Image: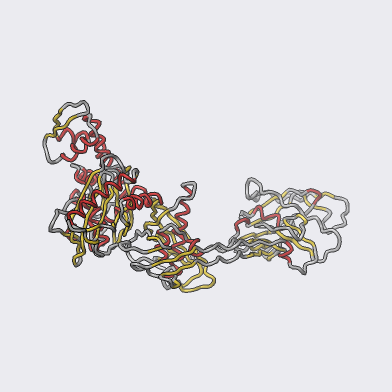
Amino acid sequence: MAEYKAQEKDLIYALDIGTRSVVGVVGKPAEDRLKVLDIEMAEHGKRAMMDGQIDDIQQVAGLAQAVTARLEQRLGVRLERVCVAAAGRALRTQKGSFQLELEEEQTLDAETIGRLEAGAVSAAEEALQAEDQGRRQMFLVGYTVAQYRLDRYPLTNLQYHSGKLAEADVVATFLPGEVVESLYAAMRAAGLQVASLTLEPIAAMNAAIPAELRLLNLALVDIGAGTTDIALCKEGSVVGYTMATVAGDEITEAIMQAFLVDFKTAENIKRNLGEKEEIRYRDILGMEETVAASQVEEAIQPPLDRLAEAVAKQILSVNGVAPSAVFLAGGGSKLSGLREKIAVKLEMAEKRVAIAGNNFSMSAFSDEVDIVNPEYATPLGIAVSAGLGLLNDSYVVMLNGQPAKLFRSGVLSLQDILLMNGYNYSEMLGKTGKSLNLTVDGKHVVLRGEPAAPAVLQVNGKEATLSSLIHAGDQIRFVPAKDGASASRTLGQLLGSGFTGRALVNNQEAALDTMLQQGDVVLTVAGAPGPLPVQPPVAPPPAAPVVEAPPRPAPEPIPVLQETPPRRDRYPVIRPKLLQLRLNGQMLALPPKENGVPYYLMDLLQYSGIDFERLSRPVRLEVNGEEQGFQYQLKEQDSVVIRLL
């Protein structure tokens, strides 16, 4: 036999690694469709996949090698590059929000909007990792922007608008790293290089629902053995992915229990439904039996109901309402009665739930094999997606010397690729070090952290930006940004080398080498001779943030005064037992301090309801309508306002 020819650049080899079987499709683009040259399928000898996730890498690799070898022999071609898809079982969806404060009002360009969206995606990833209670690498599959806001005003598009505060809310979809890595490992063990990676629901959508039909709100439901993957489209694009853990295996297991057969026999019984009125089989006791197809259909009604319910629930959770039509694909789509049950659960007309396959001819054709089979939706979709350029992941892009993992359809930017390969927003742009918020002699002071060291972004050896578009064969070099150091000051550094007085930090006399902490209150007395006057200690916050004394209808009581020995300091020698004043419009009654020490404006901070540990804006202090400092001595019936600017 002659040596095999090398795989030509435009020859597409797609593998669908399913729970029950591995299907290989080989084809070539022919104008605007894919010409399918051959299809091969082989079943796992034992369970190597669990709910769509690779469990036994070596067994999957061996079956992939067998399928590849049969195709190579028939076609006379050495297949080396393969296009694959990850199951939707492990998809994780999470909301994320982010805001950018611009230094001055400016027009938002694509680069700035990209930074905003990347921050929101990273926030979503961090939320997922927090749920998992540990670092877990996530690969971005895709995201949609739920809402933009500019200066708090909602917008559908930020491009060319001007403002100072931009915000974005996104819904992002991720795959855990182990799902992707196990698929790559199996292909490496099979001697194949992954040229394309997408999601099974995206691939099935590309085969069953061509782009020209996606202006309608449609759902593609791919019912495999271990998982049921769902994709939804509207207004020209895929808008959501989800999955149900109920699938074909639950039907098979119900047959096992009802007729006492092993898994393989139950699978054969299931496949013969709709083709034979009576089905012969051997049970686990070795007895030859015959069962009417109607009895089998009756036995599988409970899991069939659960499958229809799960599909309808997941579609509604993503789409909000029933779609215009539903296409069923995969081996499970042939189950008698399932189509009708899904229509009932979604409260749709029965004719609007159809078996996929009729639209395959819009994107693919074959002179050799019959491709009009709903079981071919995913493998055919993988091949069509790569061969017709429906996914930008149908070519190899190198990231730091390794093939990048790519998922999304449409134009891809450098930022997209970094997000899809597990990098987050802070690694792309870096974070400025945390600011240090202080109050110095009644004024809010913010000490800024150090700026981040920028990331290295290069495409084909040239400097690039996050918005740079990436093309087939591009070589990307990326070195993550380094976060800036947080602001840090001693008391002496804050006050400067020329300061010669004394200072309190949080009402305690402090040395100049004292390291300042977030929220510290600093009071100074420049050039003060002798000891510094003792300031009142800051009381710990009470259980309730505000102690209110509501106005009473009775006349205001006359303050009871008490005499104290004469003092040599500036404090009054007589005080009322209760200090009654108004804080932010509410009455507040304060008990007397020890030794008759007066109340200062700073004493009311704990009652204001403002979190001074996390200040984001300056605070304004007013007494009787005039701005005052922290050291202002409060008097009976003062009207105090403490508010954020």
Direction from residue 599 to residue 302 in the image, left or right: left
Q: Position of residue 66 (x, y in %)?
A: 24, 48
Seen at 32% across and 52% down, the residue is 187
Q: How many marks?
A: 0
Placement of 117 over or under 556, stated as above or below: below
Which residue appears farthest toward the left when viewing the image? 277
Image coords of residue 205 (percent x, y): 26, 56
| Viewer can see residue 225 | yes
Instruction: Please say whether residue 326 is visible from this viewpoint.
Output: no
Q: Can you say which quadrant of the picture contains the C terminus?
A: bottom right
Where on the picture, by quarter, is residue 360? bottom left
Quarter of the picture containing the N terminus is: bottom left
Q: Is residue 333 above or below residue 522?
A: above
Image quarter for residue 141? bottom left
Depth order, front residue of 99/344: 99
**Residue sitting at 51 percent across and 64 percent down?**
481
Name the colour scheme: secondary structure
- Asked whether, in this view, residue 159 is left or right of residue 643, the answer is left
In the rendered image, the vertical position of residue 127 relative to residue 245, given as above or below: below
Q: Position of residue 616 (x, y in %)?
A: 58, 61
Judged left or right of residue 506, residue 165 is left
Left or right: residue 55 compared with residue 355 = right
Q: Position of residue 280 (x, y in %)?
A: 14, 32
